Image (cartoon, rainbow, N blue to C red):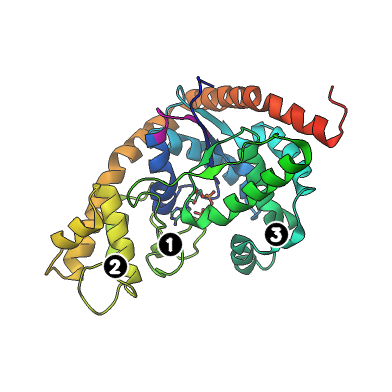
Amino acid sequence: MIGDKKVIFSGIQPSSDSITLGNYLGALKNWVTLQDEYNCIFSVVDMHAITVRQEAAQLRKNTISLLAQYLACGLDAEKNIIFVQSHVSEHAELSWILNCYTQMGELNRMTQFKDKSQKHPENINAGLFTYPVLMASDILLYQADLVPVGVDQKQHLELTRDIAHRFNSLYGDVFTVPEPYIPEKNAGAKIMSLQNPTAKMSKSDPNPNGCIALLDKPEDIIRKIKRAVTDSEAVVKYAEGKDGVNNLLTIYSAVTNTSIKDAEKEFEGKGYGDFKLKVGEAVAEHLKPIQEKYEDYMKNKDYLESVYKNGAEAARRVNRRTMAKVKKKVGFIVD
Ligand code: AQP
């Protein structure tokens, strides 16, 4: 790690063959702006992904694909530590230890657990329940100062802070207590499903029309946005009760780098048909160069392998001291 730059940790699950526009606008796009100013550690968090049943061969493909998506979006493997979570076994080790410092009641309150249990009633496994402890381990293992998460992950970060405080109050200053990183302007906003704009856009949405994938073809992006649920008012403005329009305005402003106010002005007097077409085209245009770079990276599997191998080594180098300290504090014989 370089100098006294602050440390940032974040990750995305390879739970689909493409991340969504939500993952991109809420997370990845902002990470790219951080890589010069901070010591950034970005992981493809495959261990989180198996809290929901995955097909093994597909998970391997998705993991490589997500790594290529990270790079295509502009993450630089020279500037950041980029690795696959399951390659660095300390994540699982610390997670076990921190499980013993986390209360059932705390985990019971997590809304993501409630949501995902409802979505997968046939597989409410213990991993899904303790997912936030693994996330806490990911962050605390690297003494991260800041965690750039979308609004949807704030509750988990709060729990991470509580666990760190608890551990520190027992054993002294072992962990840096991380802060949420709040991006400027409306970056990091929560992107909602196009078909149900009160629910967040998710990779695992069973309705393909609700979600735009980073790797969707331009014609599919435009078609999905044309079909997005709006309202009957036919006025393009950001207002309470206009969830669908608000979502499209948020998307438009993020991909064109304009403010919501300017976007409202641009569409004054225009109908939803025109508005949606413009949003669709703007998204497709924004994603085009990313998709091209993605194809190039995917053709170079050797390079991708070198990125994740070097990344795992670098991650281990950084987490070694913390892991040894934790083991010593809890009473393990450190070899
Ligand atoms: N809709 C969203 N809007 C803004 N940010 C979002 N993020 C996810 N969805 C949105 C941000 O993406 C990062 C990584 O998410 P993840 O893949 O680790 O887990 P997730 O939040 O569970 O994402 P998905 O797409 O909903 O995945 P599935 O369907 O597999 O559960 C986080 O920083 C998150 O804030």
Q: Quadrant of the C terminus?
A: top right
Of 15 and 102, which appears nearest the observer? 102
Report the residue marked by disc 3.
106
Q: Can you tell which of label 3 and label 2 is closer to the viewer? A: 3
Q: CA distance from mark 1 to mark 3?
A: 33 Å
- Number of the label disc, if any, that sits on residue 245: 2
Give the amino acid type for the residue marked by disc 3 in the picture: Glu
- In this view, the residue in front, 329 or 252, is 329
Q: Give the spatial CA distance, label 1 vs label 2.
A: 19 Å
The answer to which of marks 3 and 2 sits earlier in the sequence is: 3
As helix, strand or loop, the secondary structure at mark 3 comes to helix
How many neighbours does mark 3 have within 10 angstroms: few (below 14), some (14-19), or many (20 or more)?
A: few
In percent of the image, x 64 and y 45: which residue is there? Answer: 136
Q: Is mark 1 within 8 Å of ligand 1?
A: no
Kindly report which numbered mark, 1 or 2, lies closer to the viewer in this rendering: 2
Say what amino acid the circle numbered 2 marks: Val
Which of the two labelled residues, at mark 1 and mark 2, occupies the earlier sequence position?
Answer: 1
Mark on residue 208? 1
Cα–Cα span, label 3 and label 2: 35 Å
- Residue at 42% x, 57% y is 190
Q: Quadrant of residue 305?
A: top right
- Mark 1 is surrounded, within 10 Å at the Cα level, by few (under 14), some (14 to 19) or many (20 or more) other residues, namely some
Could you tell me the amino acid type at mark 1?
A: Pro
Which region is colored magenta? 34-41
